[in-house]
Amino acid sequence: MIPALLDCDTGHDDAMAILMAGRRLDLRGVTTVFGNATVADTTANTCRILELAGLAHVPVAAGAAAPLEGTFVHESGVHGMTGMDGHDLPPPAGGAIDESAVDFIARNIDATRGLHLVATGPLTNIARVLTSFPGTRAALAGISIMGGSTGQGNATPVAEYNIQADPEAADIVFNSGVPIRMVGLNVTRQVAATPERRHCLRSLGNRTGQVVADLLDFFSDRLEERYGLAGASMHDPLAVAALCDPDMLRFEAMEVSIEREGAHTRGMTVCDLRHLCPLTLRRQREPLGCPNAEVAVAVDAGLFWERFIEVVVACP
Ligand code: BDR
Ligand code: CA
């Protein structure tokens, strides 16, 4: 299995990403960041889910409480006050280790050849690692990111939440030279936790299936109210799938720039979808765009559900 760390802001769909990473990757640790709630709450939620899934041995390291610039404002509209409303899991028995997320990630990159990162929250911790420990850029095998979009946004008309929450960090990560897979809203919104799929999870008969179905009920209600979607989007586990099950996604290499200035576009991932050949670019005297990411452009939603159900079945 592929060795990996998961950096997340747990979160309903981050919880699903933890389950999938714990069963389908060689998960060496989970690091936390502000986002769907305060970092104290995303850390507690992470420990709760690891304990639920029988993964309490996986170390958790707490990270950034705010973006590189500006402050964090907790927006409880989508994930509720705790960041993971919908099922009251007991307080975690364990907690975070006594090492910062940044030091923990850098130490593991150094210690494990071929290590990948999966990022399902704002990219603050990862940007700090890449700037404070520049040697990690060449040592990392890749970063699989849930973030951005080739089209519509959610936090704003054009910006996706994880990128918009810390565009300066996203800019550092996308320009780091580390191989990047970007899994954005353009594909994650195609994988919806419809009422039938939630019913199927609840009928599996194990505790994890019940908890996952309750969490997805809450998350689905919020996304339906807010965006008129037919069920929660399985955003974050798809960034895990991009690493362990890349056959369920189709990627295209392209240049992705992070907009940091625009009054209406800050946090947008500007994806060059033009497929211009180098000769055309030269004729038009445009600067040669250099692909810096493999961007997911299509997804097999049915295959995702089959594999996700297998993951939940394998949990207690
Ligand atoms: C992303 O933002 C959060 O609401 C989710 O956990 C996901 O990582 C989707 O835009
Ligand atoms: Ca998330």
Image: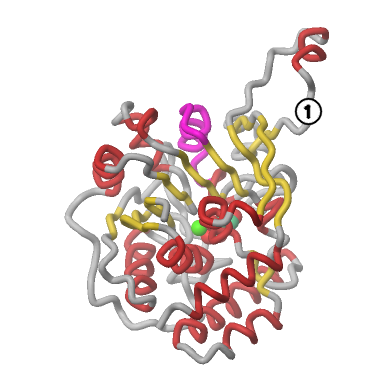
Q: Residues within 10 Å of mark 1 (few under 14, many from 20)?
A: few
Task: List the residue tagged with mark 1.
Answer: 275
Ligand 1 falls in which quarter?
Answer: bottom right
Q: Residues in magenta?
A: 165-179
Q: Name which quarter of the figure residue 237 lies in.
A: bottom right
Q: In screen coordinates, is 35 left or right of 280?
A: left
Residue nearest the viewer, comparing 201 with 129: 201
Instruction: Give the vertical position of 283 relative to 13 (above or below).
Output: above
Q: Name which quarter of the figure residue 269 lies in.
A: top right
Instruction: Give the vertical position of 84 relative to 154 (above or below).
Output: below
- Please provide percent x and percent y for residue 279: 79, 12
Residue visible at 29% across and 60% down in the picture: 60
Q: In screen coordinates, is 98 left or right of 230?
A: left
- Please provide percent x and percent y for residue 248: 65, 56
- Please provide percent x and percent y for residue 316: 40, 83
Residue visible at 64% across and 53% down in the picture: 247
Instruction: Verify whether residue 178 appears in magenta.
Output: yes
Instruction: Give the vertical position of 147 relative to 8 (above or below).
Output: above
Which structural element holds mark 1? loop
Instruction: Give the vertical position of 21 relative to 291 (above or below).
Output: below
Residue visible at 27% across and 44% down in the picture: 108
Residue nearest the viewer, comparing 140 with 69: 140
Callout 1, which amino acid? His
